[in-house]
Amino acid sequence: MPTELRPPKRSSGLGSIINTEQDVTPVVLAAMAQAPNARLREIAAAFVRHMHEFAREVRLTEAEYDIGVDFLNRIGQATNDRHNEGILFADAIGFSTLVCLLNNGNAGATETAAALLGPFWRMNSPRTENGGSIVRSPTDGPSLFMNGRMTDVAGKPIAGVEVDVWQASPVGLYENQDDSQADMNLRGKFTTGADGRFSFKSVKPAGYPVPTDGPVGDMLRAQQRHCYRPAHLHFLGYKPGFKTLITQVFVDDDENLTSDVVFGVTDALIGDYRRHDDAEAPEPAVKAPWYSLDYTFVMEAGEAKLPVPPIK
Ligand code: BEZ
Ligand code: FE
């Protein structure tokens, strides 16, 4: 047995014999209290306290414990390079949004409000010229012309921001969920110009159901919840010297803005997706109706770091 796993020769004084339900929590906390990493100590202790208290509060039965363990195991089994059920679960219980809001901003008072990365960001989306299209295989749906601007908190344009964009198609599927779309369809990476601007052509996104063929789907059905996200575009702005901005801009006429299955909508992130029935489109070949979206993103000074991609 490796030395570090051997039990101590002498009792620590606290004793580790557990006689009653009340004994368990302090003994477990004491067993974990030697971790040299202070942050690990803090997180593990709080986790154990809350988990034990949770079991006490609901007086968890053994059959319910078995269901919970099976649920966790199924989340792991449903996760692979193309799908991340763990993130989906955290999203569907509002945990991802809680962590996002704890760590980012002030509801748009200075920097643009952050929103979930979600399970569909891919690291190497194709670099695309400003004004270029992210439609990479035939994709039905009204055209959308997006004009974005990146500024600092003083309103000064930021040049050289790498802006990753990704979205679901008008039938509500990301390309990695849909064999009929080309690899990297509706994904692109843009760089802001000296005026802080970037722009692209796409199709208007649709709302979509989150995947429901795994344990998270079972949970939603048991809770009689719908499984839809309101339509949105995802943006990730990255430039050294600025805090990475991860957000979404929601379609203003979507019926599920107030019941997003993953609790991701804030008022500041509802965009003005403007429908044009008469005006000529920026590309003459595009027939009405077409849509435009103008949106200014504000980035704070800070650390630029990329998240771990949830899928490959
Ligand atoms: C998304 O916006 O891509 C997303 C976020 C949470 C769960 C599923 C999808
Ligand atoms: Fe999405």
Image (tube, helix red, strand yellow):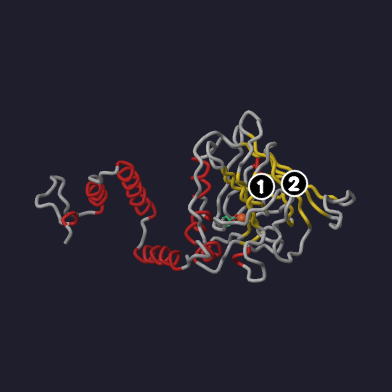
Q: Quadrant of residue 169?
A: bottom right
Residue for point 16% across, 46% down: 14
Residue, disc 1:
249
Task: Name which of mark 2 and mark 1 comes first in the sequence.
Answer: 1
Mark 2 Cβ and ligand 2 under 8 Å apart = no
User: Do the numbered discs 2 and 1 sit on residues whose CB atoms are within 8 Å?
Assistant: yes
Distance of label 2 from label 1 (alpha carbons): 9 Å
Q: Residues within 10 Å of mark 1 (few under 14, many from 20)?
A: many
Is residue 266 shown above or below 255?
above
Left or right, 241 with respect to 182, comes to left
Left or right, 51 with respect to 245, comes to left
Q: Nearer the viewer, residue 18 or 296?
A: 296
Mark 2, secondary structure of its residue: strand
Q: Residues within 10 Å of mark 2 (few under 14, many from 20)?
A: some
Q: Nearer the viewer, residue 149 or 250?
A: 149
The quarter of the image that holds ligand 1 is bottom right
Which residue type does callout 1 highlight?
A: Val
Res. 293 mark: 2
Mark 1, secondary structure of its residue: strand
Across and down, in percent, residue 72 comes to 42, 63
Residue for point 63% across, 48% down: 248
Which residue type does callout 2 highlight?
A: Leu
Across and down, in percent, residue 200 comes to 72, 50
Residue for point 57% across, 53% down: 262
Q: Nearer the viewer, residue 145 or 157?
A: 157
Is residue 181 shown above or below 163?
below
Across and down, in percent, residue 58 comes to 39, 54
Of the two numbered discs 2 and 1 in the rendering, the one whose residue sits closer to the viewer? 2
